[in-house]
Amino acid sequence: MDRRGVLKVAGAVTAAATALVALPRVAFAAYSEKAFKQKAGADALQNAYGANATTPSDQVKLKAPDIAENGAVVPLEVQTDMEAESIAILITENPSPLAITAEIPAGTKGLVKTRCRMGKTTNVTAVVKSGGKLYTASKEVKVTIGGCGG
Amino acid sequence: MSSIRIKAKERKGMVDVKSLMKHPMETGLRKDKSGKKIPEHWIQDVTAEANGKVVFAAAFNTSISKDPYLAFAYAGAKGDTLKISWKDSNGATDSAETKVK
């Protein structure tokens, strides 16, 4: 094998190794245009999780204010004691309802806290994926001043 | 300085992580003074790694507030190296590291 051949093989091996190292990252759901740009919550779930059949569950705990005076920053918290694989938040009345999806690897608590924008009074649904099924909890948040800008 | 601030504290084997990222999170719906739409520009992916292992990964939509706040908890220990990184819709990235207290 000449020098060029050796270099080629070395390059291929390096590329393969890089691909292998990069794989575990890909396994975690990254931002998906298809899921996040949907106008309906059910379509967003279908694209994010490949299913949109949900079951309300009291094991999904959603903390949200009753009234949000400022729709630009509404604190939300989703917590569950189930073995969660993923947690999502849907804000029904927003132009695109899916606000966040979070991957929960083994050893990580079924917990997500963040702050969201809400355009107007809306239902907020917390979705927990556990054992391949989707469980939900919903709550209505009254919004005094919308926060989506428009 | 990094755009990310992290606080991570261990309690009974769980590390509570709170993070704040500085980012405009433009929705694409807002208009400037002349009535022109400000193009969307937001953080799409956030990944947290403890000692190189992914412990939390989130994807954001534009409905996450400006200067996003994100909190979660994972099974870890004092002294873990916790790294949080984000990537936005323009392809820009940033990351920050901290030691778990």
Image: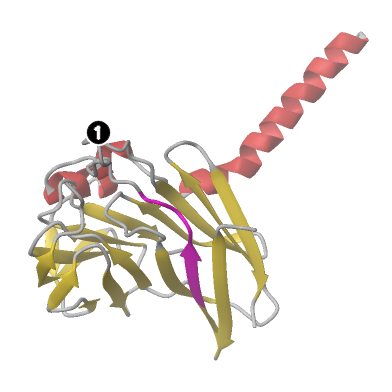
Q: How many marks?
A: 1
Q: Who's the residue at 46% across and 36% down the image?
A: B90
Relative to the observer, which residue lies in front, A66 or B46? A66
Q: Nearer the viewer, residue B84 or A5?
A: B84
Query: In the image, residue A96 lies at what x, y percent?
Result: 19, 46
Depicted A130 relative to depicted B42: above or below: below
Choose between B82 and A60: the one closer to the eye: B82
Q: Secondary structure at mark 1?
A: loop
> Which residue does the image show at 48% across and 74% down from the upper left?
B18
Q: Position of residue B65 (x, y in %)?
A: 32, 60
Residue A131: x and y, percent? Answer: 30, 63
Whether residue A103 can be seen here: yes
User: Is any part of residue B81 visible from this angle?
Assistant: no
Q: Position of residue A53 (x, y in %)?
A: 13, 55
Say whether residue B3 is magenta. Answer: no
Chain for mark 1? B
Q: What residue span does the magenta drawing correspond to? A: B17-25
Q: Is residue B51 left or right of residue B18?
A: right
User: Quick check: A66 left or right of B21?
Assistant: left
Q: Is disc 1 surrounded by few (<14), some (14 to 19) or many (20+) residues within 10 Å?
A: few
Say left or right for A147 vs B47.
left
Is A142 situated above or below A58? above
- Above or below for A23 versus A138: above
Report which quarter residue A126 is drawn in.
Answer: bottom left
State which quarter of the image contains the N terminus of chain A: top right
Mark 1 sits on what residue? B36
Magenta includes B20?
yes
